[in-house]
Structure formats: structure tokens, C-alpha cells
Image: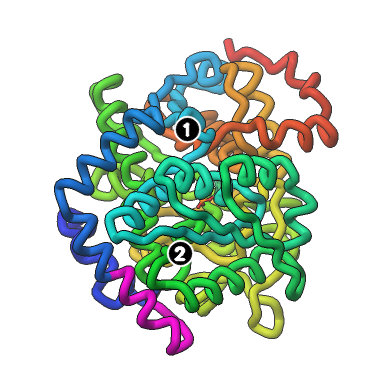
Amino acid sequence: MMDFSRYLKDYPDAEGRFGNYGGAYLPPELVPAFQDIAKAYWTVSQSSQFISELRRIQKEFQGRPTPVYHCERLSKKLGLGQIYLKREDLNHTGAHKLNHCIGEGLLAKFLGKKRVIAETGAGQHGVAMATAAAFFGLECTIYMGEVDIEKQAPNVARMKVLGAEVVPVTAGLKTLKEAVDAAFEDYLQNYRDTIYCIGSAVGPHPFPMIVRDFQRVVGVEAREQFLEMTGTLPDVVVACVGGGSNSIGMFEAFLGDPVEIVGVEPLGRGEQMGDHAASMRYGSEGVMHGFNSIMLKDPKGDPAPVYSIASGLDYPSVGPEHAFLRDIGRVQYDTVSDEEAVDAFFKLSRYEGIIPALESAHAVAYAMRRVKDMDHGSILVNLSGRGDKDLDYVIEHYGFGERYRDFPVRK
Ligand SMILES: *Cc1c(COP(=O)(O)O)cnc(C)c1O
């Protein structure tokens, strides 16, 4: 196995590359803005003042560390292996996204910027960003496609109550892609007093690195907690992969360990283009949204249409570091369908009293599949968020999960 002791120092390199992947493919007029933030990040993030302030906020405001939890009942029903969860659903606002938004907000504060901007699709990133902005007293503008605004009324309301300005984007298909373009445009005009905060470990350098660094807390905590609870390391570490932020945060701490690491992508309704968002399985190398990675392409080579029951996973590419970790053979990527995710959603709810986000339910479903074949050992799953946001949809389409009442007990 590759020596990972210098990994964080070596990757990404000065150009933001993880092997072939990453980089910054930008219109020339945006280059200074991104160089600006990369340079500032290097200096500020190393300072002991920044690090100790971030720790204090994580503890007092976010409620970190989040616990690691042993799913005894669920494990017992499935087999002899044990499932453990890292409870990011208990992070303030109910998901991991606040980890990097708080980091980016603190960065803005340290750099003397007075405003943050972000794009959002389903609204989860927008809510986390608006929360961080309120906490730091920063102005906050969120770009959101008009179509998404109509679909995601509760999240739009949350952002507004938190004091953010939500700007409807009316260009093109009026969804996430156009919202990204609008946010870039704003950043170009205003980068002197504004920081752009991307929603996942994607985008041009330095964003994949910044988001990864701020999400690392998840894996660092989980590794230490798991060791303390069990005296050993888990055999398998699992997380769901949309853009790849909760997963990279979880994985990083285990790269140098003799631990199998698996990222789970959404297979949605099936293998046809437009029915899934499994970039690693069906995609190929290409540049989109300013970085080189593995992406799903339509016949013309443009980003393909994607779908998943979990709106946080329907992204036609994946963070560049994941593409690299797959190429060097350190992380495996597998898929879980809508149906399996819904099954896990109900089983975790009924047998552990934890309603997971549909995104996170993909990782739980994978662990449930694997644990059936294990006669010992353990799987640690990053439960990236809670499922309250998904309840209305699930109930409408699947009822209350009545058919899980007789979930058989293994003798
Ligand atoms: C947004 C989201 C995801 C997917 O994003 P990543 O960047 O891949 O982590 C996963 N789980 C939850 C709960 C989310 O809100």
C-alpha cells in the first residue's frame, strides 16, 4: 500500500492536482479571485488562532464531537458483523454540510470579508451557509434556480428566516447548474469583499482542498471514538458520495490504516442515462464546473442528466480526490438503488430510532448488504444527515413502512 504519512502535504499539489484530477479550469478574469483565496487559505488556516477558534465553535455551536453509535439491534437482525454510525445527523442543522460552511465563514472573518455567497440545489447547502453567515454576522447571498425554489419551499423559508438573500436564477433550465454560473458571476464582480463557498468537495482549486480540510473533523473524531469504544479499527468504512464532501471527510483519517474504504453512489431507478448519478461506474474523465474528474457525459460530451431519490446525490461528477483515490486503488466505489435506500431508511428508523437522510440511507443500505456476509468484524458508516427533510416525500410514495414490521430475526 502507498505510504499515506505525507498524503495531506502532497495532495493536492500547488496546482490543485490529485494525480490527473482537479486543477482550476477558469475564464482568465476569474483566475486572480481563485488564486487570492488559495493564498489566503494557506496562511490563515495554519494559524493557531484560527485552529483554536474553529475548535471552540465546533464544540459550543455545532455540538461536536458528534457520537459514534453501535447499531446493536439492526446488526443482530442481519448477521454477525456489527454496524456503527458516525452521527453527523446530530451536527447542528442536521447534517455534515455545516462543517465546511463554518470553516469558510471563519475564513471570511479572518480575511476581513463581509459577505459570503453560495449556490444551492435542493437548499441544504444554502441553509448551512445561511446558518454560518448568521453566526458570524456576515451578509449572505444564495443563488438558487427558480425551479428549485418552487420545489424546496421549506428550505427557502429557512434561509430567509436566517437572514440570507435568496436570488432566483431564471437562466437556462433554472436549476443548480445555472445557479453555479450566477454565483461565479457575482464572485467575479465582488471577490474583494466576498468569499464564494461551494457546496461540496468539487469545483476549481482550492475548493476541493478547503472543503476536504474542513470535513476531516468527521473522520478524525470517528477513528478515535471507534478505537476507544472497541479497541480496534473498523474493517470497512462507508459513506455516500454526491460531490464527495462527507465521504472525503470520513475517509481521510483511515487512508493509512488496514481498513477497506467504500464510497456509495446512487443507482437511482437503473442503469440508463438519466436514471442514476453513479459517476464512478458509468462516467469517464472530463472537465466540468472548472475541474477535471470523472463525469457522466451525454452523447455530445456535455454533463449528462442525472437522477436519484436523494437530491443531495444527483451530481453528474465527483470530487477530484475521489477519482484519484479510486485510480490508485485505495477506495472502492459501489452503488445502491433508490429501492435499497428506502429499505434502509425504514429499517434504521424502526430498529434503531434514527430516521436517516435518503442520501445517508444509501451508505446504510450498503453496510446492510455487506454485513450479511460477515461472520465477524464491523462496518463504520458516516450517517451524513437526518431524514426529517425527506419524510413527506417518503410517506407519499412508500407509506409508513408497514411492511417492515415483520423484519425477520436471525436465529
Ligand atoms: C448534500 C448531502 C450529501 C451529499 O453531498 P456530499 O458532498 O457528497 O457529502 C449527503 N448527505 C446529506 C445529508 C447531504 O445533505
Tell which circle, 1 or 2, labels the residue nearer the N-terminal end.
Answer: 1
Up-down relation of residue 121 to residue 283 (above or below): above
In the picture, which quadrant includes the C terminus?
A: top right
Q: Main secondary structure of the magenta part?
A: helix
Picture disc at residue 196? 2
In the picture, which quadrant includes the N terminus?
A: bottom left
Residue at label 1?
92
What secondary structure is found at the residue carrying circle 2?
A: strand
Q: Residues within 10 Å of mark 2 (few under 14, many from 20)?
A: many
Quarter assignment of residue 42: bottom left
Question: Residue 103's spot in the image, x, y percent?
Answer: 35, 49
Kind of residue at badge 2 = Tyr
Question: Residue 31's spot in the image, x, y percent?
Answer: 39, 82
Q: Which residues are magenta?
A: 24-38
Figure coloring: rainbow
| Magenta residue check for 31 | yes
